[in-house]
Amino acid sequence: MPISLENARRRLTARLRTLDHVFDRHVIEGVQRRTDRSAMQEGLISALWQSWCAFCRETIISSAIGTNTVTGTPVTSPYAGRSEMEIAFVARELTQRRAITTVRMLTSRHLEPTWGDLTKINMIVSGISSTNQGQLLSSFGVGLVLGDLQLIRNASAHINTGILAEVNAARVRYNDTRFRHPSDTAFWIDPSTGDFLWKSWIDEMTVISELATS
């Protein structure tokens, strides 16, 4: 875990810059074969979601263990000094609405909660009660479109009729919502910006990361 939340923000910023560059190149060059195009888009969406989850995990666990904000303000919590996997255990218990009695270590990362899920973030941050709790809650509360990124990532990885129905239900929030594969939704138009939904995902992550780490 970083000694400053600035490290988490810089790491996310670098990842977003790289992925956005690849997306722009994909738009310009295009891929004619539909299977190749879907594979490229699915990979980008998955990488974007993983980058977001990594930032959320790093920021929340660091705040629990003890760190500094970008402006140098110390952050601590009742779990200060605990290990990374002990905090992960606490986070999982909180998302499952279980009381924290004895703190143990999770034995594997796959047992951890979905760190990028905004609903779970709210539960974890509220339960850990770090000194920057208010800042984190208000920052992550800015999220409007990242829930759809989670939906699209899951739909791309696990295509089935149920999740496709959820993707179809999300169309009412956007324009130009044609798609043949869930990953095509990256090209839906966000009416608030007039740009691709992909760009709104990038912008929202950028704004939240700046607020959460300040």
Image: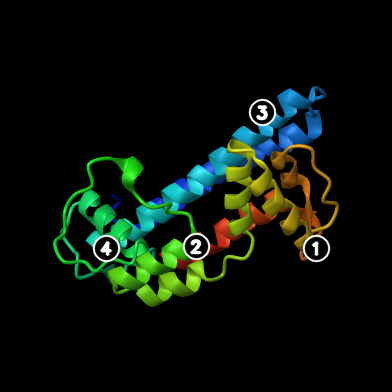
**Relative to 78, 143 lies left or right:** right
Packing grade of label 1 (10 A; few <14, some 14-19, many >=20) is: few
Q: Name the residue under label 3.
A: 39
Q: In which quarter of the image is the C terminus?
A: bottom left
Tell me if 183 is positioned left or right of 132 in this view: right
Count residues near mark 2 (Cα–Cα under 10 Å), then give few for <14, some for 14-19, many for 20+: many
Is the residue marked by circle 4 packed among few (<14), some (14-19), or many (20+) residues within 10 Å?
Answer: many
As measured in the structure, the alpha-carbon distance from the residue carrying label 3 to the one carrying label 4 is 37 Å
Contact between marks 4 and 1 (CB within 8 A): the answer is no
Give the CA separation, mark 2 to mark 4. 18 Å
Q: What residue type is labelled 2?
A: Leu
**How many numbered tags mark residues here?**
4
Report whether residue 72 is seen: yes
Q: Name the residue under label 2.
A: 118
Q: Residue 191 carries which label?
A: 1
Tell me where residue 213 sits by quadrant: bottom left
Q: Which of marks 3 and 4 is in front?
A: 3
Q: Nearer the viewer, mark 1 or mark 2?
A: 2
User: To which residue does mark 4 refer?
Assistant: 64
Q: What residue type is labelled 4?
A: Ala
Q: Which of 214 and 169 is in front in this view?
A: 169
**Residue 25 position within the rendered picture, expressed as x and y whole percent measured from the top left:** 73, 33
User: Mark 3 or mark 4, which has the lower sequence index?
Assistant: 3
How far apart, in angstroms, are the residues tagged by discs 1 and 2?
A: 22 Å
Question: Who comes first in sequence, dot 2 or dot 3?
Answer: 3
